[in-house]
Image: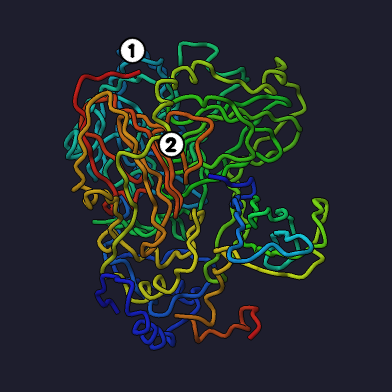
Amino acid sequence: MAITPDGSYEYLVHVSLERMKTPPEGQLVAWVTTTEIDRVERIGSLDENLKASGRVTWNKFLVVITLEPDNNPEQLMWSGPIVFRGMSRSGMMHTMVGHGALQQENCTAYGYVN
Amino acid sequence: MTPSTSVPMTRVAEAWLAVLMITALASPLHAQSEMLGMAGGWRIVPMDPNMIMLPGLAGVVPVVGAFTPATGIDPASFPEAEPFQVVEMTDGDTLDIQVSIVRRNLNGHEVVMFGYNGQYPGPLIRAPQNATLVVRVRNDIELPTTIHWHGVRLDNQFDGVPEVTQEAIQRGESFVYEVHVPDAGMFWYHPHVREDVQQDLGLFGNLLVTSPNPDYYGPAHREEILILDDILMDEQGALPWGASSPTHALMGRFGNVMMVNGDTDHRLSVKQGEVVRFYLTNVANSRTFNVTFGEARVKLIASDVGRFEREDWVGSVVIAPAERYVVDVRFEEPGNTVIANTIQAINHFRGEFYPRVDTLSIVTVSDEPANPEISNSFGTLRAYDEVAAELEPYRPHLNREPDYELEATLRVQDLPLPIVLSLEADTLFFPPMEWNDAMPVMNWLSTGDQVTWILKDQETGAENGDIDWNFQVGDLVKIRVFNSPDSFHPMNHPIHIHGQRFLVTSMDGAENQNLVWKDTAIVPVGSSMDLLVEMSNPGEWMLHCHIAEHLNAGMMFSFTVEGQRTLH
């Protein structure tokens, strides 16, 4: 089991774009960020096959692919436009309040905004 | 409301209509906990006060009766359990073990439990490698029992499996085990009858087999055992167990009180710079621990049936039910170091992960320096050439395709409708590991009468006891265990194989780079684990999930090995 000392899963993330061409200018870069977007880490630039891989140790995370002016491994945060985005499967786990068997529960009573 | 459904994953729209109809019954759990006189002697399972009761489950109790030991007898009439004693044994020695009722005080509650020789845990048996120990077991509890010598490659007739290797030991009866210990390492012993009850009530102990090689492990100042456990308690004491069949059949019974060596307040005192060798054993019914040692440096050395090829630094030790790990830990800083279970728990109600740290033990480090100073040897990672050499004949088999493929799944019937509906709706994400009981009421209400956990032979379609595997001594068998994420409610499974040893060669296609002989290994949800099993020991042996409730809900089968016993 790949578990960090704080109990988080360590995921190996593979990013792959299909049925698209390499952009004529700039560099596609893959990032991961928490769902609150308060922490961002750079996975790396996509290679000629439009693939990139990296590790992430957050339980829920977003994958963001941006078009950057160049490939700068020191870059801490994206500056270019977001081209694609995705979400970890764990991101699909959300509150039961207001859904399913608890549909009649008042979301705001539990701190959620309607 | 107990409609019968056998859970096909269809009719969802129909189901949602039913959900809407019962939603009005929703009520906060804290109100439910005030209910008195639940049917059948049950008390509602403790639950996070921030959660609410699922509609339609108020007042519902498990379909089986409640069991607590020695019901109606004054607990004061039973002897108070004592801490475990170390029993040094040599070849041919005999040990008498009495299985009896004891009294414990846990978290301020008087609890009637079981004990081996009146101790918690049972005696720590120390014996030299290749010794044969005679253990005479007398059963004085109200349930039939056996002792399984977990991980030991002993003669089949002493493996302790009722209806397979022996008849269960009835109350007042005895059985004599001859325990030959061919491998060095930390093993353990426990019943193989209703483990969910008997093991949870304190029937477990360690068996430490020592190598004749004085340099088997590196230098350490002392050795300590850490038997990790949990127990489910409320304000009245321990929650009852299922009488005829386990409760908590979906996820296993997670406790809410942590124990080390049966103690809820385990403590150690060490000197500054002291290197302590910890032998970790997880005897919990279902909980996998992620054990951390504060800021202390931790060196991983060995697991179930021997040493790793190479020692390694680790930040934590993930230990599933029935697994063992050996680590050396150096305590450098004076003060308190907390040994903890450090996890990212799940709140299903909020759909969130949240950090949770439960103290397992507090180590007080004095400013008196440890003697001798062994920081240099501790700081060096050793590679065990003899382990690597022993593994050479097995390496050509590590990457070959599996001979057998098992799928882990489950089938349910007659669960209360709200549980079925909730689980059918909750299918977008299943965590690879269940670190906590995130749905305690639903889990409690699911019994072994309603849930069948399944190991399915992919080639033949046979399930559990219908699986018919036969081997010869000397066979190296590659088994792939796939934990299907598409089942009704998937969960991790610690797979245990009796009487043989195996290597975990890969997980999800990633090769294992540091091999160690195992007898138990956990398969996360959605993962495939490849095992190379050395069939060295003739007899009829079990393969099963070691979550006690899963085992007692069907997740097991036996296979045979024929030929002359040939242990390497």
Q: Quadrant of residue B25?
A: bottom left
Which quadrant would the C terminus of chain B be assigned to in this image? top left
Query: Which labelled disc corresponds to residue B215?
Result: none
Residue B159, percent across and down?
Answer: 26, 31
Which is more toward the observer, A53 or B203?
A: A53
Left or right side of B376 for B61: left
Q: Mark 2, residues whose alpha carbon is within 10 Å: few (<14), some, or many (≥20)? A: many
Which is more toward the observer, B407 or B76?
A: B407
Q: Mark 1, residues whose alpha carbon is within 10 Å: few (<14), some, or many (≥20)? A: some
Output the chain of dot 2: B
Q: Quadrant of residue B16?
A: bottom left
In the picture of the structure, the residue carrying the numbered disc 1 is B91
Left or right side of B499 for A34: right
Q: Residue at x 70, y 30 (%)?
A: B331
In the image, residue B236 sits, relative to residue B128, either above or below, namely below
Which kind of residue does numbered mark 1 sit on?
Asp
Residue B427, percent across and down?
Answer: 44, 68
Residue B542, percent across and down?
Answer: 26, 38
In the picture of the structure, the residue carrying the numbered disc 2 is B120
Which kind of residue does numbered mark 2 sit on?
Tyr
Q: Residue at x 44, y 31 (%)?
A: B304
Residue B363, percent across and down?
Answer: 65, 36
